[in-house]
Amino acid sequence: MKELAELALDTAKSKGASYADIRICRYRNQYVFGRDKRIETVADTEDIGFGVRAVANGAWGFASSYRLERDEIERIAAMAVEVAKASSRLLKQPVELAPEPAHHDHWQSPIQKNPFKIPMEKKIDLVLGINEEMLKVDGIKVAMTYLMFNEMWKYFASTDGSFIEQDLIFTYPQATAVAVVAGDSQTRSIQVPPEQKGYELIESIDWIEKARKTAEEAVQKVKARQGTSGKMDVILMPSHLCLTIHESIGHATELDRAIGWEAAYAGTTFVTPDKLGKLKYGSPLMNIVGDKILPNALGTAGYDDDGVKARRFDIIKEGIFVGYQTTRELAKFVNEKESKGCAFADSWSSFPMQRMPNLWLKPGGKPLSLDQLISDTKEGLLFDGMGSFSIDQQRYNFQFGGDAVWEIKNGKVGEMVKNVAYQSKTTDFWGSLDAVCSQEYWENWGVFGCGKGEPPQSARMGHGSAPSRFRQVNIVSAGGKL
Amino acid sequence: MILDEKEIMSLLQNTISENPGKTMGIGVSARETGSTRFANNAITTNGVYSRLDLFVEVLKGKKRGIAVINELDKEKIREAVARADVLADVAPENAELMPPLGPQTYPKVPELYFKSTAEFSPGKRVDSIISVIDKAKKEKLTAAGFFETSSGFSAFMNSKGLSYYLLSTRSYFNNTLRSGEGGSGWASAEEEDVDKVAVGKLADGASRKALDSRNPKPLPAGKYTVILEPAAVADMVWFLLYNFTAREADEGRSFLSLPDGKNRLGEMLVSSKVTISSDPSFPQIPAFPIGEDGLPQEKTVWIEKGMIKNLIYTRFWAEKMGKAPVSFPANIIMEGDNYRLEDLIRSTGKGVLVSRFWYIRDLNPMILLLTGLTRDGTFLIEKGKVSHPVNNFRFNESPVNVLKNVEMMSQPLRVVGGETGQSAFVPALKVKEFNFSSVSDAV
């Protein structure tokens, strides 16, 4: 592999590249999808290819191909340089990459059981078993279970002297019960965080017990009263807060958005560079970390797709915004000497761009259990799991629903309510954070399909937190009749 | 590297011939793409991409296995067939699996492949982008956007005699021009023939919106008469049709559900002004004439003068319910009226003009309640004129209400939805009582 990589780098250099890198990648996926008592899909997929990125005349060029052959590598490397030269006609400032030592390394997800070596029959039995258990609950109309196993093998080499091989494995289970009762339909999903783990993730869960509980909650949800609008305290569980962190902090603190590179598509951000070190993002309880080394998290790796060694860094400290997510190219825009290691490409055929690392909320510093937090809340709502989500192109105005929502009355969890969401402005919302449970309640959740860029790319990242309370948030009712 | 029809069909035929007696299908799709992104009046990324996927399915009665690779090497294809075969052995019977189709006759559609697009070079993309940036600079605006051209084919053959090969090109352009004074404008286009992408006109459109939307004034949330420009209408109608599946309706989990397992097919759902169809042969917005499992994609009327005429029926659900299968829409064609956008504005005493929507998501599928935001130019209309730009809004609203409350329509045109990114041939709409639920400070 090293020989092929060197061929690409040498070709790019001989054509005039001042910098070049190549990623040779092999992606392997396995899918099992079952609906009710049937298996609809069993599939194995494999995708192999390479992409060459080159800087020539100060501009980027990129070319990629699925044909991993010597003549094709030479053609594609030359083409990347040719494209860079075409781009340089419209150059505002030349690409400057923050320095990074050359790395020669191999990194692998710390998995215990390779999911691709587990017999398919076992996975099929699990999917059917979960669905069957859900369908036993009166009121459940449809049960759907999906297992996805994914391996990303990448070989990165650059003209800076790095040769890095990485092998990442992910396990993503998802199961949903659909209840239909008295003219309404609601869903509830089994709450298991996707992680960078092997089949041990599947084996660590009592799926049948979870399937039964989830299906019963789906029926409770469909029979629940409609939520009402108004101001209310909310307690957000880590399974839910995951997406709120992702959308309102993660995307907002991406430096490429802050300097306008995403203006035409995903948008920019209210967190402009002049606010670095000054913006009061939220309450002093708010401590957010960017992190590519968190064990088993979805965004963890040994190195990013710039070849930068993974690291951890502060984004928000005691409510103050202190750091952006960056890449080698972006670091200079905030006068930083090194990259934070946040480059990622979702395929050999994709140009690496700045993508969110794992980004998580630190637990509270004082002992606080979930029970204590609920007991301390007179009236409010408790949100679990992800629901509807939408946020504007500068990350001010958002609205989130939950997978399940319960009312809290006089310090106790009461009945479930349905069709509610909360709507707020990012800094108002995080400013209303007044309690975060302590370390033992911290859980590592994540987002599996985050879209960004044109052409669109999908990425995954972890978002951990402990249950947290936000005061007097605007609740929106989503009920009504057609 | 696009393989010609003869070469690829011969590869597919040989694979099937190598497996006598096996019920199987094999498909190959390949695409050569070039795309350039720009922002802050300069190019940010520029690349060429060559992708190929080879799909094999093996069926054993009601059991099916699937393998996907991205190589054309004969030995690798043999391995993929063997893998799909093993998975078909392992898979339990799926009572809903339909038998493979035999030979089909597809409707003739307008040309989907244009050499002009296939041969469009990175240099030509850069030339176009330079012209946009020059316009932006003249108006002291900042331009960002994306220009992509691609060519490719999609081919399939099965052991029952079904086969097709489709060659196509696609060009897609968008530009967002922004001012430092809170203004932003957007325009986009998708065409099979890149020569039809009027980059200059699209840059002018975005520039005008960016200048007109500077210094927006506050306007509170609430229910307003709105004029939705065609790009906003495209998103609303696509979200409506995403949810037009008969099975969900019959199972009681859709806004189209009625008691006792019935659905709203045949019901007057929206205003009698509204007629929506799909037709791959429609000249202004042609599409692939191939639907689910290789079924021919015929013209389908979804809503006629307000009444639901068709829902999406998969092959299985159609057979179970005694209906003909109806594939997912190939495109969207909504009839309009003989007015211009300016006429809709002129007829409005007080209202809000919406250029496009963004970040639309389901909020309550049982009433098809959606949430999303306005973006890139939102304006107050007073006494028949655009009065001034206003802040953006979040909406919590249903496309069903939107189409119920239509008061006026313009002539339709081909646009791309800002959220869905999908083309549609739709008019601008004047709609009463549209629910803006909160204000967004975003520009």
Image (cartoon, rainbow, N blue to C red):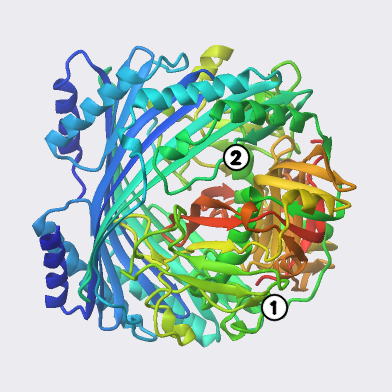
Q: In which quarter of the image is residue B159?
A: top left
The one nearer the camera, A342 or B440, is A342
Q: Residue at x 55, y 13 (%)?
A: B320
- Lateral position of residue A241 relative to residue A162, left or right: right
Q: Is residue B109 above or below residue A22?
A: above
The residue wearing badge 2 is: A191
The one nearer the camera, A301 or B366, is A301
Q: Where is residue B105 in the image (x, y as percent from the top left)?
A: 35, 24
Q: How far is mark 2 from mark 1, CA to CA?
A: 33 Å
Q: In which quarter of the image is residue B70?
A: top left
Mark 2: few/some/many CA within 10 Å (<14, 14-19, 20+): many
The residue wearing badge 1 is: A280
- Lateral position of residue B54 relative to residue B377, left or right: left
Residue B228 showing in the rendered view: no
Q: Position of residue A294 (x, y in %)?
A: 46, 60
Q: Do the CB atoms of the residues marked 2 and 1 lie less than 8 Å apart?
A: no
Q: Residue B169 carries which label?
A: none
- What amino acid type is highlighted by mark number 2? Gln
Q: Which chain carries label 1?
A: A
The one nearer the camera, B137 or A160, is A160
Q: Residue at x 16, y 63 (%)?
A: A5
Q: Quadrant of residue B115?
A: bottom left
Q: In this view, does A192 lie above or below B357?
A: above
Q: Where is residue A344 in the image (x, y as percent from the top left)?
A: 39, 62
Q: Which residue is drawn at 21% across and 26% down?
A: B82
Q: Which chain carries label 2?
A: A
